[in-house]
Image (spheres, rainbow, N blue to C red):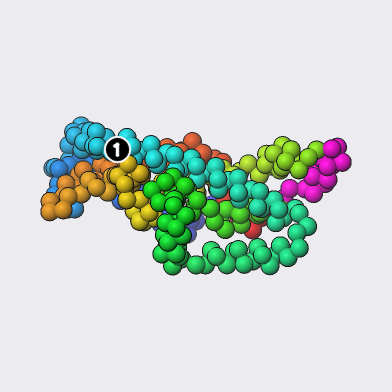
Amino acid sequence: MKNKITPAFVIGVILCMLFAILCVLPLIYMVLMSFTQATTLKMRFSDVKLFDFYNYWFALTKRGFAEGFKNSVIVVVGSCLLVDIVSAMAAYGFEKKPLPGKEKLFQVYLATMMVPGQVVLISMFVLVNRVGLSNTYWALILPMVGAFGIFLMRQFMEAVPNELIEAAEIDGSGEVRTFLTIVLPLVQPALITLTVFTFTSAWNNFLWPLIITTRSNMFTLILTMSTLSGRNDTNYGLVMAGATLTFLFPFILYIFLQRQFVEGIALGGVKG
């Protein structure tokens, strides 16, 4: 029996379309605004010049853009690698190894997720300064490791059959080889999902780099783009061009990893 299109279904589709339009409107406004020379946030369509790329040219050639982009890439790649490695290894230990008191330790570790980052900001700043990591890449990379990645990876580790690990141990496979060749391939969707989350967080991180970096040669791209606004008179078209450039790179990554990301979220929701 064929499904009939009911009024409730039509209303639901219309509401979803309206919600999608509302979500996209700020992005459209940002892109259109980037083709103007407006000094206020009020945009007039008569001021939009779609083929005038002066704002983008100025932002790309601005002193510090290349260095900021390089710093952001180093921080993002380092953060993704470190978070993936630490989270996967810790989740493997919590889920598959008979560690005494591991459940209570895991609960305490999860409790740190309820603490806002702003609460520990001062203590982190003091700690990083005392160990001499200020104005270094490590100061920007290390704080990205947290309980969320371990929690996400452990959800997927539950689905890894213990029989496979035991069979590998019987065949003489070492701990590292078992982890790399058997466990990691089975949790690949989770690793990709965690990579996308980490990439977005590290790329868009503004407050912590602003506090811990005092040298302009260590500024990330988002910090460099924040200097586009002037003290007295601000070209908001230029600011929007910088925001568009900053948004473009994670958006491209999401396009290429969209299928794996959605699959990882779906599987994580089922296992959770």
Q: Main secondary structure of the magenta part?
A: helix
- Residue under the image location 62 percent in, 67 percent down: 108
Residue 29 percent coordinates (x, y) = 26, 47
Q: Is residue 248 left or right of residue 153?
A: left
Give the residue pinned by disc 1: 65
Residue 193 percent coordinates (x, y) = 55, 46
Which region shows up in magenta? 159-172
Relative to 244, residue 109 above or below: below
Relative to 148, residue 30 above or below: above
Whether residue 23 is visible, yes or no, is no
Residue 115 percent coordinates (x, y) = 50, 67
Whether residue 95 is visible, yes or no, is yes
Name which quarter of the figure residue 106 lies in.
bottom right
Q: Give the quarter of the figure containing the C terminus.
A: bottom right
- Residue under the image location 75 percent in, 59 percent down: 99
Element assignment for label 1: helix
Q: Nearer the viewer, residue 100 or 262?
A: 100
Residue 219 percent coordinates (x, y) = 34, 45
Q: Assess disc 1: are there few (<14), some (14-19) or many (≥20) residues with their C-alpha within 10 Å of its C-alpha.
A: many
The amino acid type found where label 1 is placed reads Phe
